[in-house]
Amino acid sequence: MFSLQLPIVAENSFSPLKFRPLSSTIPDLSRYSKGFSHSHPSISFPRSGRIHTATTDVASQEENGKQTGTGESLQSDEQIPPGLRRELMPRHVAVIMDGNVRWARQRGLPGTAGHEAGVRSLRELIELCCRWGIKVLTIFAFSYDNWIRPKMEVDFLMNLFEKGIQSEFKNFIREGIRVSTIGDSSKLSPSLRELIAQAEEATKDSTRLQLIVAVSYSGKYDIIQACRSIAQKVKDGVVRLEDIDETLIEQELQTNCTDFPYPDLFIRTSGELRVSNFLLWQLAYTELFFVDALWPDFGEEDFVAALRSFQRRERRYGGRDLPTAAANA
C-alpha cells in the first residue's frame, strides 16, 4: 500500500501484509524497530490488474473481467478473514488513533517518532478497508483542542500532514481514494489549505474508499456551526422554524461530505474509554470498540477483532427484539 504520512496525534497488532513497497515515500522506521511487537513491512497498494482506475486500458479490464473507471475493484475476489462476512461489513468506520507519544516514550524515543510510527498502522488500515469493502474511513488526525499542545509538536504534525498529501496525491487518484477533510481550517496555513482543496477536487469522483481526515476538528463546534447556519437561514426566511429536524441538521454538519455520515463502527486505541469531542452527533447509534493496543501497534489482528465484535452485535436503533413467534404474528 502507499506510504500515507498523515499527522496522527492519538496512539495497535496487525499480521504483516505482503504488498509491493512503494519505496522512497515511506518513512524509514528501521531506527525505531526496537520494541515493535510485530513486523510491519513497507506497504503499497498492489499494482496488479485486479485494481483498475480511469486510466486502465480496456484490454486489461477485459482480461480481468471488470471495469470501474474510479479506482474501484470488484470485491468478490478479495479474501475476507475467517469469521467475517462481507455483507455484514460496516460501511463507515471512524477511528481515534491514540497512543503515539506513549508508544515512543516506552521506547525512549521522541514523540515525533511515535507519530511517524503511527503512519504504518494508518497505511495498513486504509489498505484493509479497501480490500474488505468498507466505503468510508474517518480518522481523527488533529483535534481543535490540540492547538494548545507545544508549538514544536503542532508544527511537526502540520508539516507531516502537508508533506503526506504532496507525496500521496497521485496515489490517491490512482487507487480510487476520495480525500475529504472536516474541521476548522482557519488556523491551518494557506499552503496547507490550498493543498487540501486540490486533493479534494482531484479525488472527488473516486469511489473505492472515502478517507475523511478530521483536522482541527471539534464535535461540539461542528454542532454549533450547524445551528448557526440553520439560524441564519431561518432569519433569511429560507427555512421555517417547523422545518428544523434531524435531517436538516445532518445536512449542515461537516460530515455532509459523505453519503454515509453516521459511522457504523467506532474504534479507539490505547485503552482510553471516551470519544474526546469526536463526531458527537454522528456517533449516536454507533457501535463502540476500545482496544488496549497503542496506535503504532494496532494491526490487522486488532481490526479483525473489532469487525467480529461489530458483526456479532444486533443494532436496534431504539427498538426492541421480539420473540420469533410474536415477530411472525
Image (spheres, rainbow, N blue to C red):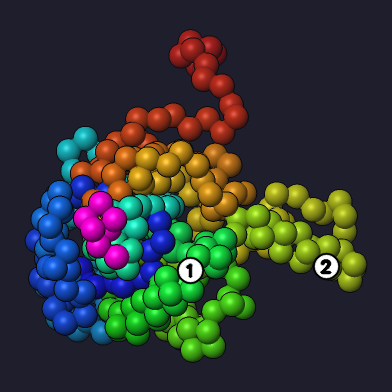
- Determine the residue positioned at 29% across, 65% down: 110
Identified by mark 2, the residue type is Lys
- Specify the segment rendered in magenta: 104-110
Residue 254, horizontal then vertical, whole percent: 60, 64
Residue at 48% x, 49% y: name it: 263
**Foreground: 131 or 24?**
24
Vertical comparison of 34 with 20: above or below: above
Label 2 or label 1, whichever comes before in sequence order: 1
Name the residue at the front extreme: 108
Quadrant in the rendering for residue 75? bottom left
Residue located 21% across and 47% down the image: 13
Q: Judging from the image, what secondary structure is the residue with disc 2 in?
A: helix
Given residues 304 and 243, the one toward you in this image is 304
Front residue of this view, candidates 225 and 264: 225
Q: Is residue 107 left or right of residue 275?
A: left
Q: Which residue is mark 2?
A: 233
Q: CA distance from mark 2 to mark 1?
A: 39 Å
From the viewer's perspective, is residue 328 above or below residue 271?
A: above
Q: The residue under label 1 is which amino acid type? A: Pro
Q: Is residue 295 left or right of residue 19?
A: right
Figure check: 313 above or below 231: above
Kindly identify which residue carries mark 1: 150
